[in-house]
Image (cartoon, rainbow, N blue to C red):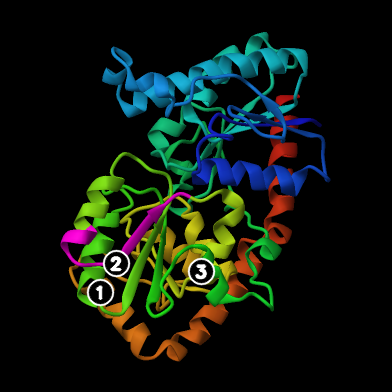
């Protein structure tokens, strides 16, 4: 059984989509024949040429009139065409992708590909079940969206993201002070890490800035993630409120060191599919504050001290203030988070579930 893992953004975009597929590839490559297909540069897998949604071409007329979604759709359409050619030359038993546009096009073309390989759409956005019903197979990362009764003709599999515990565990000799110097972070303030796309509409980094502003004498915001064109506005907001902050994008390989160099983490979004940053905090043994949406409760546990109402002004500030006053009171929760991470989200715990999904889909297609 040969598996094709495809993600158009690998090589030029740093999001959960790309990280999830890269880690899935690393977890499976020694267990089963698997090929990684990427859209950008890199050493892993095979490239399917495309025009990235952040290409400089979109800075020129008339392409600068094209919206963000249409850029992403064009990226996926070109990538899907290249992927179909690759699959014709090198047949696979199953195709797995988190790009919904890629999944749609390959589903349409599969009848002309050797073995008519089934397509598994990995719903990380996450899209509503009404949309997912168009796909033959759906991988749900979100417990909230695993509702097969809403899409009875769609075969769904519920498997959370997997993570490498060794990658996230801080070395025993890790020097926090040295790590902060490498990233030009202050030594005399509490580093609050927001590891997400730098936007206001979903990740709500502006809300985090507002909540941290009253704590500006003791806290420093480190906002790290993909620039969505709002970085300048967010930086200006922090400066206006007097909050010391740093906005940056870091390579995937350096994210664990950023976590280890920070004191605690926050995620401001009011809804998520499977927020990778939450599991990364759990695996790195860092306190994280998250809104208590259903998926947040499923990942952390319903009575977790990290669940904070991100829709009510002052709640996040109060939670961080409590942490500042007595961080040791949170240590038992951090330890419990780590045990929950190992049992539910580490690759040793979930890799075989992905393999079982691929085997089931291939058998149903036979």
Query: Start and end of the magenta stretch?
Result: 238-249
Verify whether residue 246 appears in magenta: yes
Disc 2 + disc 1, Cβ < 8 Å:
yes
Residue with the mark numbered 3: 181
Q: Is residue 237 above or below residue 33?
A: below
Quarter in which the N terminus is drawn: top right
The mark found on residue 205 in the picture is: none
Q: Position of residue 192 (x, y in %)?
A: 39, 70
Residue with the mark numbered 1: 216
Q: Nearer the viewer, residue 125 or 211?
A: 211
- Real-space Cα distance between discs 2 and 3? 16 Å
Choose mark 3 or mark 1, whichever is in front.
3
Q: Is residue 162 left or right of residue 212?
A: right
Residue with the mark numbered 2: 244
Compare marks 3 and 1 and give the one earlier in the sequence: 3
Q: Is residue 356 visible?
A: no
Q: Is residue 120 above or below residue 184?
A: above
């Amino acid at each position: 059984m040969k598996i094709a893992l495809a993600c158009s953004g690998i090589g030029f975009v740093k999001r959960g989509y790309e990280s999830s597929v890269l880690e899935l590839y690393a977890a499976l490559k020694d267990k089963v024949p698997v090929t990684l297909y990427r859209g950008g540069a890199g050493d892993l897998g095979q490239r399917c040429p495309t025009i990235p949604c952040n290409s400089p071409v979109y800075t020129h007329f008339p392409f600068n009139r094209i919206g963000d979604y249409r850029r992403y759709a064009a990226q996926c359409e070109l990538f899907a065409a290249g992927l179909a050619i690759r699959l014709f030359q090198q047949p696979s038993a199953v195709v797995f992708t988190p790009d919904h546009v890629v999944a749609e096009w390959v589903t349409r073309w599969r009848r002309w590909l050797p073995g008519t390989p089934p397509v598994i759409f990995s719903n990380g956005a996450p899209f509503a079940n009404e949309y997912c019903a168009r796909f033959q197979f759906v991988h749900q990362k979100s417990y909230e969206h695993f509702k097969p009764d809403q899409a009875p003709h769609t075969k769904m599999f519920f498997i959370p993201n997997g993570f490498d515990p060794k990658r996230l565990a801080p070395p025993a000799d890790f020097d926090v002070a040295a790590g902060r110097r490498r990233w030009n972070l202050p030594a005399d303030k509490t580093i609050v890490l927001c590891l997400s796309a730098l936007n206001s509409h979903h990740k709500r980094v502006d809300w985090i800035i507002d909540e941290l502003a009253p704590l500006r004498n003791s806290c420093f915001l480190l906002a790290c993630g993909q620039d969505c064109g709002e970085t300048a506005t967010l930086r200006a907001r922090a400066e206006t409120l007097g909050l010391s902050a740093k906005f940056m994008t870091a390579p995937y390989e350096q994210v664990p060191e950023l976590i280890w160099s920070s004191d605690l983490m926050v995620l401001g979004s009011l809804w998520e599919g499977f927020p990778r940053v939450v599991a990364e905090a759990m695996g790195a043994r860092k306190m994280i504050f998250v809104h208590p949406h259903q998926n947040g409760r499923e990942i952390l546990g319903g009575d977790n001290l990290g669940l904070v109402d991100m829709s009510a002004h002052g709640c996040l500030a109060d939670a961080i203030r409590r942490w500042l006053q007595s961080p040791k009171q949170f240590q038992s929760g951090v330890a419990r988070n780590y045990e929950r991470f190992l049992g539910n989200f580490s690759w040793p715990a979930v890799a075989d579930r992905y393999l079982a999904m691929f085997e089931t889909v291939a058998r149903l297609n036979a």
